[in-house]
Amino acid sequence: MSTTFIRAVETWVPGVDRSPLEFGGGLYGEARRFGNASRGLCFGFGEGLPGQAWEAGRPVVLKDLSGGNFRRSGAAMADGLSCGIALPIFAGEVLTSVLVIFCGDDEAHAGAIELWHNDSAASKDMTLVDGYYGTTGEAFEYSSRRTAFRRGHGLPGMAWDSGLPVFMDDLGHGSRFLRADSALQVGINRGFALPCSSLGAGQYVMTFLSALATPLVRRFEIWLPDASRTRLQRSYGFSEGEGVLQGGAPLIERGQGCIGRSFATGAPALSDEAGSEPRVGAAAAAAGLEQLVAVPLLQQGRLMASVAWYF
C-alpha cells in the first residue's frame, strides 16, 4: 500500500449498545506500527477522528496527524502517515460504521483530498469545506478554495448530480475538470469523487486527486445493484496497469465475498486476501493485488453503489 496515496484504511463500528465505536478491521500495508497501535482502541461520541465524524454527522478531514488531538500521532508519524479522513456511513439516521482513510505524501508522492458541500437552502453552488493538499503547492490550493461548482459541473458537481461515484483519468487535459491548468502544474492527473452520507443539511462530496507518481489505489471498481437488487454488477473499473477494465462484468450475490458483504450490511468490508475473493479474486491475483476494501454508498438507507479499492 506504500506506493499509493492511500496508505491505510480502517473501520469503526458501534458496539452492542451503540456506543462506543469499536475496531472493526483495518488494512495497514507497511504502516505496521500504526496498525498495532489501533486494534485495541475504542472511541466515544465526539472522541478521536472516528468519534468526531460520528458527532458531526458528516465527513471530517484531519490535515495534520502530528498534533496532540490525534491519539496515535507518534505511530502515524513513524509510518509516514500525514492526514486522515473519517467517513461516517448512515443507513437513514442510524450509523452503520465509520471508515477512516489515512494518506501520506512526500516530495515524490503527492495528492489532495477535498470535502465539498452544498446547502440548497443557502446556495446553488457546491463549495469547499476543507482540503488537504500536502506537497501539491499553494497555487492549486488557492485555486480550489476560490472555486464553486454548479450541479453537474466539474468533478464534485457531477458526483452531486448523479449521486454516484465519478472517476476522471486525465484531469489536466479534459474540459470537464475546471481546474485543469492548475492540475497540470502540480502533476495531478486522476480524480475520484464519492458522494457521502450525512445527517445534516445539504449534500457532501469527497474528492481524491492523485499525482502521477502516486495513484490513489492500484485498481478500483464501481458496482451497482441489478434490477432485482439481489446482486451487484460491475459498471466500471480502472487499473493503473491495465487502464479501463474490459470484458464481461461479473455478478456478485448479496453477501458474497467482501463486495457482497458491503451490500448486505451497509458497512465497509475489508479483505487482506483479495486473490481469494469470489468472482474477482482471479483477476486480483493476476494483477498482484493483495488487499481490498469495499465501501457502500447509501442514500436514505438504500444502497446506490459499492466502490471496491484494491491495493
Image: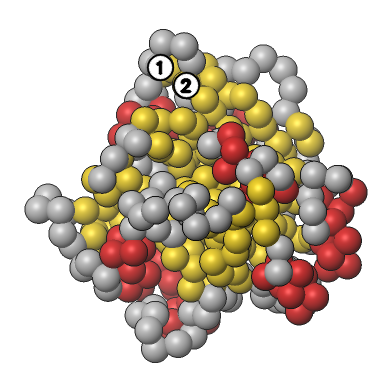
Report, in whole angstroms, how far the alpha carbon at label 1 lies from the one at label 2: 5 Å
**Residue 92 location in percent, x, y?**
29, 40
Q: Classify 10 Å Cα crowding around label 2: few (below 14), some (14-19), many (20 and above).
A: many
Q: 282 or 306, which is in the foreground?
A: 306
**Residue 269 in view here:** no
**Under tag 2, what secondary structure?**
strand
Residue 244 % position (x, y):
76, 32
Q: What is the quadrant of residue 43 in the picture?
A: bottom left
Residue position marked by numbered label 2 in the rendering: 225
Residue wearing tag 1 = 229
Q: Quadrant of residue 268?
A: top left
Q: Are marks 1 and 2 in contact (CB under 8 Å)?
A: yes
The reply, left or right, for residue 303 in relation to residue 310 is left
Q: Where is 287 relative to 223, above or below?
A: below
> From what the image shows, is residue 283 above or below residue 44?
above
Answer above or below: position of 282 versus 55: above
Asked whether 64 or 270 is in front, the reply is 64
From the top left corner, tell me how far across and down residue 109 is, in percent: 73, 68
The residue closer to the viewer here, 203 or 219, is: 203
Classify the position of the N terminus by image quarter. bottom right
Q: Which residue is pictured at 67% across the width and 40% down the height? A: 152
Q: For this view, does 247 lie left or right of residue 90?
A: right
Residue at 32% across, 73% down: 48
Instruction: Tell me which residue sits at (67%, 75%) in the image.
Output: 134
Farthest residue, direction bottom: 68
Q: Position of residue 39 (x, y in %)?
A: 31, 64
Q: Is residue 196 left or right of residue 136?
A: left
